[in-house]
Amino acid sequence: MKLTFAALAVGVLLGVIIGVPLGRRVERVAWHADATLARARVTGWLLRDLTGWLLAAALIAAVAVFVVWALTR
């Protein structure tokens, strides 16, 4: 997040000093970078949650198979 603000500040300074188009381009790149990091963070959370759910489902299935096996023996 600090990197995004720094890039935006640099973009604003470049926009004022050199010209508006370059400053806006730097700001746009910073915005896209921040959006990409946010998507990666959400994807990581999703993968972690799905992994947890799959492990829980596998454990429940294993216990159910063991119980059925124990009852049929």
Image (cartoon, grey):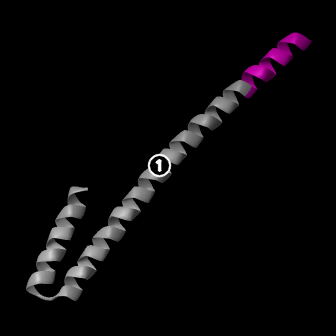
Judged left or right of residue 33, residue 21 is: left
Above or below, 30 relative to 63:
below
Residue in the image at 24% along x and 63% along y: 4
Q: Helix, strand or loop at disc 1?
A: helix
Q: Position of residue 58 (x, y in %)?
A: 69, 31
Image quadrant containing the C terminus: top right
Judged left or right of residue 55, residue 29 is: left
Which range of residues does the magenta coloring cover?
A: 61-73
Q: How many marks?
A: 1
Judged left or right of residue 18, residue 27 is: right
Residue 72 included in the magenta stretch of the image: yes
Magenta segment, prevailing SS (helix, strand or loop): helix
Quadrant location of residue 39? bottom left
Q: Position of residue 72 (x, y in %)?
A: 91, 13
Residue in the image at 87% along x and 11% along y: 71
The residue beneath circle 1 is 44
Above or below, 45 relative to 20:
above
Image quadrant containing the N terminus: bottom left
Outermost residue to the right: 72
- Specify the amino acid type for callout 1: Gly
The residue nearer to you, when weighing 63 against 28, is 28
Residue in the image at 25% along x and 74% along y: 27
The residue nearer to you, when weighing 67 against 4, is 4
